[in-house]
Image: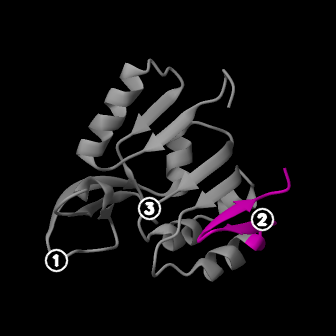
Amino acid sequence: MGETGIVLAVEPNTRNLGLLCLNVNLNSLRNVRLFKNALSNSSGSARLHKKSGPNSNMYHSLTQEWKQEDWEEVETLSLSDFIKLAKVPQISFMKIDVEGAEESIIIHDTSIFEDKRIKVLYIDHHYGVNYNAIIEHLTKFGYSYEKIQRSFLLYTSI
């Protein structure tokens, strides 16, 4: 990343964002920008479902509901709207872990992949996501891919 690179972190969960902000401040990180949003297939608002119980901060989703849950209303951004808001011309590396919404987010936004504004995309694995559809969609725009355990790394010719 170097001294001129920046980290853009998107976290919709209020408690998790507070912990992330504390970590950034405690470590005097100057190149981290935090966004309290959820990535989605459209910009607006949605219900963020939060699983109750031990380690519940790890489980929140726009697409999954649990029997014992809490929720909060969050602002959503499409991937292209997020990139506009962040005011970055290009993203060298993006990790996307959105608890099952990966397919709808990626397939919805075609222009950023046509323009290859994201050079490397790491997609975390979640059950119920059609990864073949994501790979088929992105290979149309010249992306290649590798499977890493159960997750995928997609990239342009760098």
Task: Select label 3 or label 1 by which is in front.
Answer: 1
Q: Is residue 5 above or below residue 71?
A: above
Q: Which quadrant of the figure contains the N terminus?
A: top right
- Return the mark for residue 98: 3
Is residue 145 a member of the stretch shown in magenta? yes
- Return the mark for residue 58: none
Is residue 80 a member of the stretch shown in magenta? no
Q: Is residue 155 above or below residue 63?
A: above
Residue under label 1, please give it.
67
Q: Residues within 10 Å of mark 3 (few under 14, many from 20)?
A: many
Percent x, y of residue 30: 50, 20
Q: Which picture quadrant has residue 122?
A: bottom right
Q: Is residue 135 above or below residue 54?
A: below
Percent x, y of residue 76: 37, 55
Label 2, secondary structure: give it.
loop
Mark before the other along the chain sequence, 3 or 1: 1
- Look at label 3 and name its amino acid: Val
> Which stretch appears magenta?
139-158
Residue under label 2, please give it.
143
- Look at label 2 and name its amino acid: Tyr
- Look at label 1 and name its amino acid: Lys
Q: Which picture quadrant has residue 67?
A: bottom left
Nearest the camera: 12 or 123? Answer: 123
Label 1, secondary structure: give it.
loop
- Determine contact: label 3, label 2, CB under 8 Å: no
Q: How is the image coloured?
A: one colour
Nearest the camera: 117 or 111? Answer: 117
Identified at 31% across, 52% down, the residue is 75
Task: Select label 1 or label 2 by which is in front.
Answer: 1
